[in-house]
Amino acid sequence: MKFTCSQKYQWLLCLNHHDVVYGTGTPISEQLKFRSARPVLYREPINSNASEE
């Protein structure tokens, strides 16, 4: 995976081994909408410390 972020950490962009782009931050979401990309929105933060019940 390759990551790129702004110098002020306002956005983050990731390219995985399937050539799928992931991004977060207002400038990224605006560009994805402009390019008619299908965004995936998370409603809750992902908790990596949660144990499976």
Image (spheres, grey):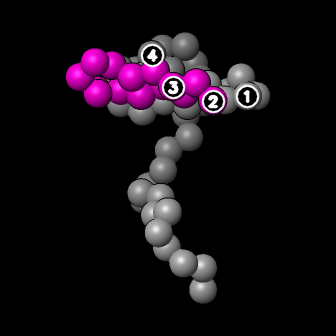
Disc number for residue 31: 4
Q: Compute the Cα span from label 1 to label 3.
A: 12 Å
Q: Quadrant of residue 11?
A: top left
Circles 1 and 2: CB distance less than 8 Å?
A: yes
User: Where 12 falls versus 43 (above or below)?
Assistant: above
- Residue projecting furthest to the right: 18
Going by the numbered disc 2, the residue's amino acid type is Met
Q: Point out the stretch of residues depicted in magenta.
A: 1-14
- Mark 3: which secondary structure? strand
Q: Is residue 6 visible?
A: yes
Q: Is residue 25 left or right of residue 21?
A: left
Circles 2 and 3: CB distance less than 8 Å?
A: yes
Q: Residue at x 49, y 73 (%)?
A: 50
Q: Please tell me which of labels 3 and 4 falls first in the chain.
A: 3
Q: Compute the Cα span from label 1 to label 4.
A: 22 Å
Q: Which residue is mark 1?
A: 17
Q: Compute the Cα span from label 1 to label 2.
A: 6 Å
Q: Residue at x 76, y 28 (%)?
A: 18
Q: Nearer the viewer, residue 10 or 40?
A: 10
Disc number for residue 1: 2
Circles 1 and 4: CB distance less than 8 Å?
A: no
Within 10 angstroms of label 3, few (less than 14), some, or many (20 or more) residues?
few
Q: Which residue is mark 3?
A: 3
